Image (cartoon, rainbow, N blue to C red):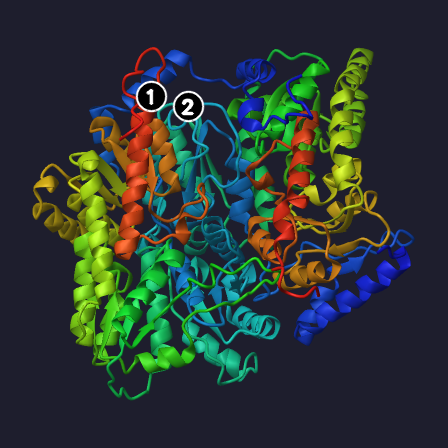
């Protein structure tokens, strides 16, 4: 059943009004600012974002600690990251983000381990600085090959007045300058993971980048040095990206932070160009390096051939003709693969409608990949985006797309139930709700334990995964045959 | 170019293709890695007795614990009541974590809201958050009741739930008579089993306060925090039904985490109703399946005048026997013949298979009660539970386990490790190897590091699907546990005899 764009806009408006009616009046007023239909004639009229979630509405958001330990710092593989405070935060985030890395876990790499100071009542009452010192001593004893330590603050740290900065400095001195980074990412700071990204970026700036710049460690540069920022190597995403950059003759001197190391972070100010995939979580440090070290940065998008090709050309445009020619060669090389993927899956996926609700970049970045397969994104929203994310999204949106910022479980369920898309892409907390409703679903944070999705190699996996989600025979079984059709 | 549209390569094969191997080898020049020899030496050192001693000397650092925090257990307990929306007063990230954690284990949605406290609440307290949260949750999600617990922030700044909830009602946030049982569940005290205990007691206190107990012949059953609840609770109900007993299960999330895929999302399903909770005050006795999950709850129940009985996650033949005999005693009815036959079948199966497990060494870790039940069952099979470790079991727990070991000749060389973590276990496995490891999904790192096969029988199980749907309790559950262990044993034996040209003689078709 096809509806005109105008009908769709009216339907969306009615749906938003209906959903808001279920809230208490005060809350409805607040939520109204986060829900809208995109109107291509009034493209500035977007939704409000980066505002506190309403208590009691089942937001999908996490916290600043999740943004710092879980996203930015956690994947740096040769560092030990201490979840500083009680046991839970580290436990629930242990190994759940699929930041792939190479190394010998427990010896020179520590990503899939959970280090915690495991606060007890006495630590809350008397303060935890002494315990933290001992934690650091014990790490140094048992993990002598760690390249640095970070302290990821959980809620109590900022509330009980611990001085983790002083501990860090003292211990760093004791261990002959061994890097120890205090991060004030207590979960109550800010309104979502987003402030945690910012705090983590600032800690990288103050404790890694600026000291490295000051010390001016020798580094043999080439004119083709680039760094990948904001790729967390979920299922190997950064690897299937790196391979393309290297094939076009660039030298990737650092990966942030998936499969990253302290040394790579320290190398980054030497890059000729910083390549920024997740703008939301890493723009702060990119801007800092631009101001401080004169490293320009460019955003790119490695989802789906259209955007990959556009990004490769954009990146190449910052370099000489050799690189530009190489970019064309890389694009030509992978053309056959992309075309084969599209030929295989587009007939099965063409015209299918998708609703998304994800984190920092994917609510806009994956739209092109779906469109390469002939699919249409009819609703999207950010868990923790800011207005600059929504601004960046507008060019990718079709007229009449439903927008929902920091969507509540209630709203999302109602939207999907009414609109009945062919696929929902969101997180683990949403997955089973929609699958029970008989609606195909893919986790778009963890790639549903698949991936990589970045690059041409990843696009093949992306297309296959969307096909097996949508065209699974399971969805024909939802309704028992003896039930009359609705 | 390794990727191909016809035969799409996934991560486990894609990154082993030569292009990627070369790329990753080349990346090392930027990584400042330690030389391979140093890494290899350090790896070997980390397996040594010397390392083990340093590792066990740890006092402050916890590495890879097998334990979560209180509010997780509180949310679990609240999910077990009919139409109940769990709400955690504190920062919102906590709730995102609990919901994800349960969903990854049960492969089910978990509904829970937060009062979303932020910096201003740190200064002014979380009263306004509580008022708004109750109002929004009540209006949007139409629960029968809201079960409130707390995470760190609210506890550190000292928010008073009782006063806050009363205040919220007075401000018209929710109706005065709306049920809001609550419990303070600081994450820096105890573990998820403590939170279960606190929240369950909170529910009972809410409904029993001021009520007069009129004793009847019914029995209450409390299961405790249980990752297999979806499979286990039907077994318990079947047992009570077989006895023809009048019983109430206090806290039953087995339906909420097992809803059908039939086109409808059920935010609430099953669970103990308010009427059942109220009636439970009159029961003649309450039986807890897991003592360490119910210490405070049982004390409170005993104070109401009921008999209380507790078990330590009984498993296997003798464990289940003891449980059934207690039910028989409490109901005054004999153990039903159907259960006796089931027992006989389990004993028969054990007799058929015990030779394969006799003398095999096991390492196991998990919640205190589970460890006690599992230890007893392994001893019953003639196996040796060599290393028994718990991150949330204390000295009192260790003494109980020791008593179980002392009672069996197979327990002679076995040791108990209270308040230890999986990095301690790593040292144990390297220095004193065993044949099998029993634990949760986090044990897969030990399986890799120490080359010991992992059998998943503890929460959480993220990396295998639907195990939680099958019971480990009762004779029926014991049979499943037996098969899980045997499967792993036979798999290992087959693997060890599968080297063609080397061990063609050992790959027997009959085992």
Q: Is residue B71 above or below residue A245?
A: below
**Percent position of residue B103, x then y:** 49, 52
Which image quadrant: the N terminus of chain A?
bottom right
Of the 4 image quadrants, the one containing the C terminus of chain A is: bottom right
Mark seen at residue A104? 2
**Residue occupying the point 34% across, 54% down:** B471
Asked whether disc 1 touches disc 2, contact meaning CB atoms under 8 Å apart, the reply is: yes
Q: Could you say where residue B341 lies in the image, as x and y percent from the top left?
A: 22, 58
Residue B173 visible? The answer is: yes
Toward the viewer: B131 or A102?
A: A102
- The answer to which of B44 and A9 lies nearer the viewer is A9
Mark 1 — on which chain does it sit?
A: B
* Direction from residue B42 to residue A99 in the image, left or right: right
Residue occupied by mark 1: B43
Can you tell which quarter of the image residue B420 is in?
Answer: top left
SS at badge 2: loop
Q: Relative to A289, is A110 on the left or the right?
A: left
Q: Tell me what residue is drawn at x 27 percent, y 57 percent.
A: B474
| Residue B19 coordinates in the image, percent (x, y) | 61, 15
- The 10 Å Cα crowd at callout 1, few under 14, some 14 to 19, many 20 or more, is some
Left or right relative to A214: residue B497: left
Secondary structure under tag 1 reads helix
Q: Residue at x 33, y 21 (%)?
A: B43
């Amino acid at each position: 059943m096809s509806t005109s764009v105008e009908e769709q806009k009216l339907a969306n408006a009615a749906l938003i009004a209906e959903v808001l009616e279920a809230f208490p009046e005060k809350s409805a007023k607040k939520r109204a600012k986060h829900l809208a239909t995109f109107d291509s004639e009034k493209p500035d009229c977007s939704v409000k974002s980066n505002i506190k979630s309403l208590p009691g509405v089942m937001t999908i958001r996490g916290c600043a600690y999740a943004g710092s330990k879980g996203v930015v710092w956690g994947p740096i593989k040769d560092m030990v990251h201490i979840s500083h405070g009680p046991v839970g935060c580290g436990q629930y985030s242990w190994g759940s983000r699929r930041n792939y890395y190479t190394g010998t876990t427990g010896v020179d790499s520590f990503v899939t381990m959970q280090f915690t100071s495991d606060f007890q009542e006495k630590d809350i009452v008397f303060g935890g600085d002494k315990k933290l010192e001992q934690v650091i001593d014990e790490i140094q004893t048992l993990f002598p090959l760690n390249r640095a330590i970070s302290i990821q603050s959980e809620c109590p740290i900022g509330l009980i007045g611990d001085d983790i900065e002083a501990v860090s400095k003292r211990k760093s001195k004791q261990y002959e300058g061994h890097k120890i980074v205090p991060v004030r990412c207590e979960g109550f700071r800010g309104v979502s993971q987003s402030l945690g990204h910012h705090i983590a970026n600032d800690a990288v700036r103050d404790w890694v980048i600026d000291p490295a710049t000051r010390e001016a460690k020798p580094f043999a540069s080439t004119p083709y040095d680039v760094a990948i920022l904001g790729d967390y190597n979920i299922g190997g995403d950064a690897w299937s990206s790196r391979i393309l950059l290297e094939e076009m003759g660039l030298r990737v001197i650092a990966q942030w932070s998936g499969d990253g190391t302290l040394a790579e972070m320290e190398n980054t100010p030497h890059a000729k160009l910083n390549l920024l995939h997740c703008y939301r979580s890493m723009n702060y440090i990119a801007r800092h390096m631009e101001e401080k070290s004169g490293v320009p940065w460019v955003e790119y998008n490695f989802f789906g051939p259209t955007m990959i090709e556009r990004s490769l050309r954009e990146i190449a445009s910052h370099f000489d003709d050799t690189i530009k020619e190489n970019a064309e060669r890389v694009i030509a090389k992978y053309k056959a693969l992309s075309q084969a993927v599209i030929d295989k899956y587009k007939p099965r996926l063409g015209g299918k409608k998708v609703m998304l609700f994800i984190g920092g970049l994917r609510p806009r970045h994956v739209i092109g990949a779906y469109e390469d397969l002939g699919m249409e994104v009819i609703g999207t929203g950010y868990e923790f985006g800011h207005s600059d994310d929504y601004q960046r999204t507008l060019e990718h949106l079709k007229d009449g797309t439903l927008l929902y910022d920091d969507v509540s479980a209630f709203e999302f369920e109602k939207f999907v139930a009414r609109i009945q898309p062919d696929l929902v892409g969101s997180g683990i907390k949403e997955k089973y709700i929609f699958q029970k409703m008989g609606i195909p679903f893919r986790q778009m944070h963890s790639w549903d334990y698949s991936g990589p999705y970045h690059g041409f190699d990843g696009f093949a996996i992306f297309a296959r995964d969307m096909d097996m989600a949508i065209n699974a025979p399971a969805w024909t079984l939802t309704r028992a045959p003896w039930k009359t059709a609705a | 170019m390794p990727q191909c549209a016809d035969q799409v390569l996934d991560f486990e094969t894609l990154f082993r293709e030569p292009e990627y191997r070369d790329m990753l080898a080349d990346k090392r020049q930027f990584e400042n890695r330690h030389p391979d020899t140093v890494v290899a030496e350090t790896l070997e050192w980390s397996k040594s007795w010397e390392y083990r001693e340093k590792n066990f000397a740890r006092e402050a650092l916890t590495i890879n614990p097998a334990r979560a925090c209180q509010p997780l257990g509180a949310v679990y307990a609240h999910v077990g009541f009919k139409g109940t929306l769990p709400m955690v007063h504190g920062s919102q990230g906590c709730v995102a974590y609990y919901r994800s954690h349960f969903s990854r284990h049960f492969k089910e949605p978990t509904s829970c809201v937060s009062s979303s406290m932020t910096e201003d609440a740190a200064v002014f307290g979380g009263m306004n958050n509580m008022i708004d949260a109750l109002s929004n949750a009540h209006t949007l999600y139409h629960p029968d009741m809201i079960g409130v617990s707390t995470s760190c922030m609210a506890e550190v700044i000292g928010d008073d739930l009782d006063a806050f909830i009363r205040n919220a009602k007075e401000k018209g946030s929710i109706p005065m008579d709306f049920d809001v049982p609550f419990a303070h569940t600081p994450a820096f005290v105890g573990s998820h089993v403590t939170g279960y205990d606190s929240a369950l007691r909170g529910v009972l206190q809410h409904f029993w306060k001021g009520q007069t107990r009129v004793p009847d012949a019914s029995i209450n059953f409390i299961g405790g925090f249980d990752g297999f609840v979806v499979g286990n609770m039907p077994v318990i109900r079947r047992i009570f039904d077989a006895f023809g007993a009048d019983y109430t299960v206090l806290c039953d999330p087995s339906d909420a985490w097992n809803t059908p895929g039939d086109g409808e999302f059920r935010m609430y399903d099953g669970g103990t109703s308010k009427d059942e909770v109220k009636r439970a005050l009159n029961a003649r006795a309450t039986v807890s399946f897991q003592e360490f999950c119910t210490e405070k709850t049982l004390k409170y129940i005993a104070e109401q005048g009921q008999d209380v009985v507790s078990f330590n996650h009984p498993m296997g033949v003798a464990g289940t026997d003891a449980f059934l005999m207690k039910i028989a005693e409490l109901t005054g009815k004999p153990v039903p013949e159907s259960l006796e036959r089931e027992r006989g079948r389990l004993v028969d199966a054990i007799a058929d298979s015990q030779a394969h497990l006799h003398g095999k060494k096991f390492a196991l870790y998990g919640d205190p009660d589970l460890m006690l039940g599992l230890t007893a069952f392994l001893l019953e099979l003639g196996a040796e539970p060599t290393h028994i470790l718990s991150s949330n079991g204390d000295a009192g727990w260790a003494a109980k386990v020791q008593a179980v070991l002392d009672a069996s000749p197979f327990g002679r060389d076995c040791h108990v490790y209270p308040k230890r973590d999986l990095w301690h276990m790593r040292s144990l496995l390297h220095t004193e190897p065993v044949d099998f490891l029993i634990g949760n999904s986090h044990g897969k790192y030990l399986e890799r590091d120490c080359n010991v096969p992992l059998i998943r029988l503890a929460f959480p199980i993220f990396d295998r699907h639907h195990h939680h749907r099958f019971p480990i309790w009762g004779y029926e559950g014991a049979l499943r546990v037996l098969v899980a262990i045997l499967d792993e044993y036979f798999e290992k034996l087959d693997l060890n005899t599968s080297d063609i040209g080397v061990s063609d003689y050992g790959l027997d078709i009959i085992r």
